[in-house]
Amino acid sequence: MANETYLYFDAAASAPPCAEAMAALTDAYSAYGNPSSLHVAGLSARRCMEHAREQLATAFRCKPEELIFTSSGTEASNQAIFGLAAMRGKRAKKIITTDSEHPSVEEPLRKLETQGFSVVRISTRGGVLDLGQLERELDEPIAFVSIMQANNETGAVYDIAAVRRALNAHKCDAPLHCDAVQGFLKLPTAAAKLSVLCDLVTLSAHKIGGVRGAGALYVKSTLRNLPPYLLGGGQERGLRSGTENVAAIAAFGAAAQAKSADRERLSAINELREFVIAQLQGSGICIHNPPQHLPNILHISIPNVLSSWSLNLLSEQGICVSAGSACSAHSQKKGNRVLESYGLPKEEIESALRISFTEQNTLTECERLCEALRTCTTLAARSNRTAERHSV
Ligand code: PLP
């Protein structure tokens, strides 16, 4: 059963669906026909889906036919990366990315490394993309470039406009893919720019107030011959076979429309972030504040307190935060590639927490969160002292 009583500070994992998305979802469930069927029920489902495509295209500032619906951001990035590798692999084997991409980009790239591609990972130390290193790597033919817009763990925003300028300056014709799953509708002018700057962009519904189970890949109309990743009935103009999740797509479109109009929302969210930073001053908690950051993600470390310990303590009080990306929470892999790339020392990585906000959070909730975080530090200090006494 869904629990309505918790304080939710994990919107970067999955944001609560907005009212408009829930209404569209419910409506779309009654359009149960297959959107590829030519009868009236199929056409009704298709209308629902095409309406969502238009809503998303308006929010992302592109043509509706430049959007391919997928099941998730992960699938959209896999489509982009394997598609680009197949399309460009004969011309060049060098791929450029960053050292802090989400696993849905990093893992496909690792697979390509086993198939003869070389992958150069540009440093994002301190949350800043090293543009000098990027420029130095553009001295030979490049298969493609994949650089995220905003990091899902630290909230750091990378300068995609500067990446485009660097590619142009070096007359590099490599297509540019951008994972904009966290940045979409969180940065005021970014949507308008990304469809101009990039050839392919990954989006995901459940980070913007839609529901899980829908993503999209923007494919610029000038990028021709991108081969499909999923083969089958040829849906989505042949680029993504499989019957579309019409209800989740309808909710995606409704959420994109509802949120895109709302710029004040972003500064309201940023105020919550600033409020928490101010409240935590002097508490001993380390705030990792990249120079350019999303308004909704705050990354901290509580010295000497393992993330799993504070996460549980907070969870017992009904407070949800995360210790990194939700996708890697069950991973058996040691260490944290993203936080190491950021340059955090081991102790701060082990004690890292991600707090992520929506406009539904209130200052009172934030006060409760800060109180609980301060309690974590006090309890940890007490148990450390006890441990010291025991060890004497
Ligand atoms: N890219 C980033 C930056 C993300 O944060 C996530 C999810 O956390 C994804 C991609 C994957 O999106 P999805 O959950 O829709 O597969």
Image: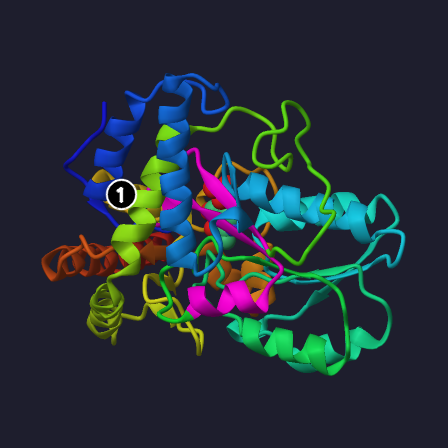
The residue labelled by disc 1 is 16
Residue 163 within the segment the image draws in magenta = no
Which image quadrant: the C terminus? bottom left
- Tell me the residue at 58%/37% (across/down): 332
* Count of labels in the image: 1
- Tell me the residue at 21%/57% (across/down): 359
Q: Nearer the viewer, residue 11 or 74?
A: 74
* Number of other residues with Cα within 10 Å of mark 1, as a class: few under 14, some 14 to 19, many 20 or more: some
- Specify the quadrant of the image occupied by residue 385: bottom left
Is 85 left or right of 214, judged from the image as shown?
A: right
Q: Assess mark 1: CB under 8 A from ligand 1?
A: no
Q: Tell me: residue 93, above or below residue 107.
A: below
Is 375 left or right of 106, judged from the image as shown?
A: left
Residue 334: image x %, image y %?
Answer: 61, 46
- Tell me the residue at 35%/44% (across/down): 253
Which image quadrant: the N terminus? top left
- Specify the quadrant of the image occupied by residue 316: top left
Q: Tell me: residue 127, above or below residue 19.
A: below
Which region shows up in magenta?
190-219
Q: In the rendered structure, which amino acid carries the disc numbered 1?
A: Pro
